[in-house]
Amino acid sequence: MIAREQIARSFVRNRLAVAGLVVLLLLAAFSWLGPLLWPTDQVHTDLAAATLPPGSPGHPLGTTDLGYDLLGRLMVGGRSSLEVGVAAGLLATLVGTAYGAVSGYFGGWVDAVMMRVTDAVLAIPALFLLIVVAAMVTPSKPLLVLVIGAVAWLSPARLVRGEALSLRSREYVQAMRVMGGGSVRAVLRHIVPNTIGTVAVNATFQIADAILYVAYLSFLGLSVPPPATDWGTMLSGGLTYAQDGYWWLIVPPGVAIVLVVGAFNFIGDGLRDAFEVRLQRRPA
Amino acid sequence: MTEPLLRIRDLRVDVQGAHALAGVDLDVAPGAAVGVVGESGCGKTMTALAVLGLLPPGGRVLGGSMSFAGVDLRTANLESLRGNEIGMVFQDPLTSLNPTMTIGAQVAEPLLLHREVSRREAWRTAEEALGLVGLPQPAERMRSYPHQLSGGMRQRVAIATALVCRPKLLIADEPTTALDVTTQHQILELIDDLRRQLGMALVLVTHDLGVVAERVDEVAVMYAGRVVERARTAELFNHPRHRYTEALLAALPERSARDLRAIPGMPPTLTEELAGCPFAPRCAHTTDQCRDERPALTGDERHAWACFHPAPPVPTTVVTQPVPEPVGEQVLLELDSVSKDFPLATRPLLGGLTGSVSAVAGVSLSIRRGEIFGLVGESGCGKTTVGRLVVGLEQPSSGQIRFDGKDIATLSRAERKPHRRRVQLVFQDSAAAMDPRMRVGAILREPLAIQGIGDRREQRRRVAELLAEVGLPEQAVHRYPHEFSGGQRQRLGLARALALRPDLLVADEPVSALDVSVQAQILNLLRRLRAEHALTYLFVSHDLAVVRHLADTVGVMYLGKLVEVGPVREVYREPRHPYTRLLLDSLPSAGAHRSSTAPGGEPPSAARPPSGCRFRTRCPRAEAVCAEVEPPLTTDGGRQVACHFPG
């Protein structure tokens, strides 16, 4: 329905958004293609070569407290972070959008009940929920995605519900009802597409947040099991040695997290402008 | 001629690259009333704002001169003039009054700014001013806030604020556009009255030719940032010389016969400098000279025009009544004492209503096949709700709506969908009624897709057919609604409503957001479509002139009740309900003479309607019985009226 070239065109016009996209692609290439150029052993520890500083022979970024090569470890960690972040962010956005659109479109008691449910979930502190989960199960990537998704869907749900509430009383929705259209068409064709700007922006923020969540969770001990790792786990592990001068355990994963979160935020801003059909200029 | 109070010469203003004003000349003599008229975007408001030094951001004066009582306005300290020597009234009194300040403080504010007076004196003068503008109980109103007053009352307050310093010149920019017709009449009478009392000059800026017709001494017609014609009022209306003025008058529904003479095309965009006459692309008398050379304002003091081929100075067409189309006898739509109550406040889950308001209270009417039924009334009278009930967007609280003999409330689910094809709705604002994310092609295809008519190829063909029918190019399917002008969007709205080949079209104020020249195009289109498709219209409008032009039968609503129904020609010639008479007397009309009975008051709240006859609180004929017994709608020789003392 919406011309993809036009959206792409106005997205490309936003320099920061393009920069964000480039950074994101570079980080993805680093994580997945990097090990082909810089193969390292990320399974066996090597305590003899632990905490070597950057610039050591064979280890340009140094080694970790267990002797893993840091550059190679960043690549492996990036995979988990990006995978979990993107999956959890998308899951939360999908669930939240559907939930919010239905709640807002039907309004009345349906809306009242559905929104009380989100209030109830919101009332439970996320931290508490996570600690309980951490105590009960062994972590894995799909589990992380589910846990983060379960906490994060609330914000898109409330955002979309607010939009749907105002969209459903728009005259074009009424016009469609006069033609004989039903609720399913209203939600799928008119409500959801008109929230797409908000949803797309929120999705990128959700992904950025999910990557940070993975980092929080690793502080609670709920992270991908070793020898796998992610940037958050690396960061929290490095903080243990903050007083010992091993700065190279902290700064690289920290920088990676800031880069990826920033990149997603810029992309979100660009998408918001790109989806606003009314701002688009028609090529002469 | 005496030295003018306000003198504008060759005023040129640029707003963000657009030539909003391209050389305006205007004189206002002391105590004179000048009307500035034109369609939207012609620069009339910009002229007023330039005089006041209130140009919008990005606007600047490029050249020309403006002087007020000998003072150069381009260099003067405007703050000492505004609200003091020059008063101003804007269109929307809700936004021009500060919601957090009391009425008294706002009216007294100019005095405290411009005059060396004590607070107490300012307060007293403000109270006087409120009395002068006819606000009841001014002393109590001084402590009210703007939201506690009705629109008409707020506009009175705005006028009081403008007048409190006794200005020499009052600039009123569309002062009555946001108001109902009876309130508009009151406000215009008030401005007229005060002008004579205080001896001030008036510049009345409006798009409504009817408003200026009998209120001002002189009229300046603007087009594309220029004054194209200026004349004494009667002279202008009877013998317009500029071809644009002539066309504009011919497009007025109250002045012309069956088919309105619509002006083709749109006013020019002002971003490029035009070499010739700006009206040339839309004019029927254009020659090469018009395209290459700009006509200058020629003529004398009494009448000047900027046109190479002016209309001959003979009287223009006289008012003729349209002949109604022959209408069948078969009843298509019937409303039987239909009511619609809206709850005033609800709390979902906890339940419990706290009162309700009857937007429609027992309306019965019938519309025959092929008929155009005009439903008129002031805002809040329930006419829009009647339209929404008919198309099924609202369900009646009681009563029956029968379409083609069948009660639509008893239709089964399976019957309802095909029924939807037969009744369609045209909205006032087609921009709001179209999904901004959909292209025109998808918008026009949607009704066909919902009803499952034809495959994709057939649907495309039908869309092209519809576009041709309403006079839009086929390439329109690739565009978004926001890329069209108001008139074109209204054509799209009509095309979409016609897609399902309905029998009945409910049109809710379909032309009230449009300029006169475009309005005429749409009215002609509505008329043509009815003839070609054997359509029946329920035409909801607040504009009595439009209804007179288009409708066969008119129904007048007041506070949820139908008070009079009858053939248009008879009702307009000889209204029988006092409310209908009031509406017709309030109708500003270009050219036609008007009796000057000053209507009083405003409609009471629909939440607490008066007992008995709802109109009795404003009625000159009201007697004791009116408060006790509600008059039923009685039929008498093809006309229906609900009044104890019909005229």
Image: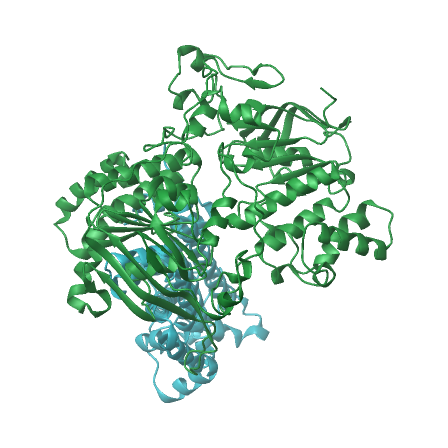
Compared to residue A153, the image places residue B70 above or below, namely above
Q: Nearer the viewer, residue A266 or B409?
A: B409
Residue B551: percent from left, percent from top = 33, 44
Q: Is residue B90 visible?
A: no
Residue B351: percent from left, percent from top = 42, 82
Relative placement, left or right, of A224 versus B592 is: left
Image quadrant holding the C terminus of chain A, namely top left
Q: Nearer the viewer, residue B251 or B316?
A: B316
Compared to residue B173, the image places residue B631 above or below, namely below
User: Which chain is represented by green in the image?
Assistant: B
Task: State how the image is colored.
Answer: by chain
Compared to residue B512, the image places residue B555 above or below, namely below
Residue B640: percent from left, percent from top = 35, 55
User: Which chain is represented by cyan in the image?
Assistant: A
Q: Is residue B396 visible?
A: yes
Give the quadrant of residue B170.
top right
In this view, the residue farthest toward the top is B289
Q: Nearer the viewer, residue B53 or A34?
A: B53
Q: Residue at x 52, y 62 (%)?
A: B616
Q: Nearer the viewer, residue B17 or A21?
A: B17
Relative placement, left or right, of B645 versus B26 is: left
Give the quadrant of residue B322.
top left
Residue B572: percent from left, percent from top = 41, 44
Q: How many marks?
A: 0
